[in-house]
Amino acid sequence: MRELGVRSTILSPQKAEEWLKYNNPKAVILSGSNWSVHDEGAPSLPKSLDISGLGDKKYLILGICYGMQLLAHQLGGLVEKSHKHREYGPAKVTLNNAHPLFRGVSEKTEVWASHGDTVTKLPKNFTSIAISEGLAAMTNKNNRVLGIQFHPEVAHTKEGKKILKNFIDMAGCKVDWDSVNLIYEIQNEVLDVVKIAKKQKLILGFSGGVDSTTLAAILAPVLKDKLICIVVDTGGARMNEFEEIKKNARSAGVKNLVIISAGKEFIKNISMTIDGEEKRGKFREVYKRIFEEQIAKYEAGFILQGTLATDIIESGKIGHSAMIKTHHNVGLTWKVEDLHPLRNLFKYEVRELARAIKLSPAIYERNPFPGPGL
């Protein structure tokens, strides 16, 4: 959505319940999931979300994959496990391109599907607007509740972006999201928090990668010498890594860069296990202790981290999202307030920010390097 210039936020069903009390979205998208609607404990819809499309709520709803199945299930349709209609990978879909959701989209198009369940009976007052091996899309009579069984958000769906653009046009969303506005919003968000606290020094976990360098470059002009960037030598860095980190810190306008040599301690702690998840856990313990020492040393009131939305999702910290791997800086508890100004962004969006603030291609094209090192 943000790639199309529309403001959006990612929320679990539980957090969406509270958010909907105070906000009036133009549109709601129910995402895909590895769950089945028939699984015990499967993600459910926020109770305050009007999925009938007939109430006084003005937002449009689009269910994608599991989101469509959940809508059908809740509204009285039938969702079944199906070997015949099971789809994983590329699929051909025939669309009703007279429908506004598919305006300008080819009648027959290639999409990306990933589902074992399928909607075999539509809810009352719903009609089919696309088919593949089975039902591929549905809408209610007033086009306010829609569902698609494939994934328009992935590059493998050739005309997916056009479908999403049609959806936000149907919802009347305002296109006002851009890099410049976001930079000011990040600066103001951090400044607003700092202004109400007595201790105004902030520590940033700095790796020299695109995330932490971009965050430092955004905040350095407004925080000045209150920003202290801490680099931890874990003993797993690449050759000449720290020269590059220093160079990137200078490019970001960092005034206070501190490098902590802790290679022996990290290696000692993680070398006693071969399990990857255990190693990450041991790494987190040392990482946290080092930063708490630096917080105390500089009497900092805050710790800043370049955590992205993907880091939080992969760590299983959003609703029912599956845990892919633990991230060393996600889910830690600190004695001071921790701030994650990039928490709603994805990697490509951070790269766009880096370009907008004129960081060098060597920074915004830099490939990710794991915190624990080699």
Image: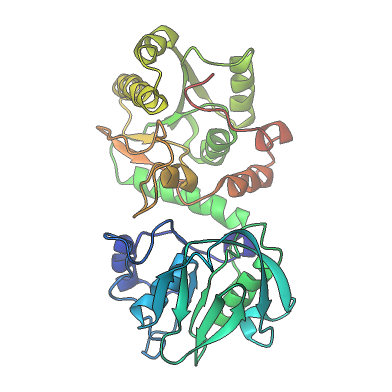
Q: Position of residue 26 (x, y in %)?
A: 48, 77
Q: Is residue 110 left or right of residue 20?
A: right
Q: Is residue 54 left or right of residue 18?
A: right
Residue at the extreme left: 335
- 298 over 98 or under it: above or below: above
Where, quadrant-wise, is the C terminus in this rendering?
top right
Q: Position of residue 297 (x, y in %)?
A: 32, 19
Disc tally is 0
Where, quadrant-wise, is the N terminus in this rendering?
bottom right
Q: Position of residue 301 (x, y in %)?
A: 31, 34
Depth check: 353 or 36 in front? 36
Depth check: 294 or 209 in front? 209
- 306 over 120 or under it: above or below: above
Residue 14 image-quadrant placement: bottom left
Residue 324 image-quadrant placement: top left
Q: In percent of the image, x 36 and y 59: which residue is there?
A: 12
- 285 over 171 or under it: above or below: above
For the question of whether residue 60 can be seen, the reply is no
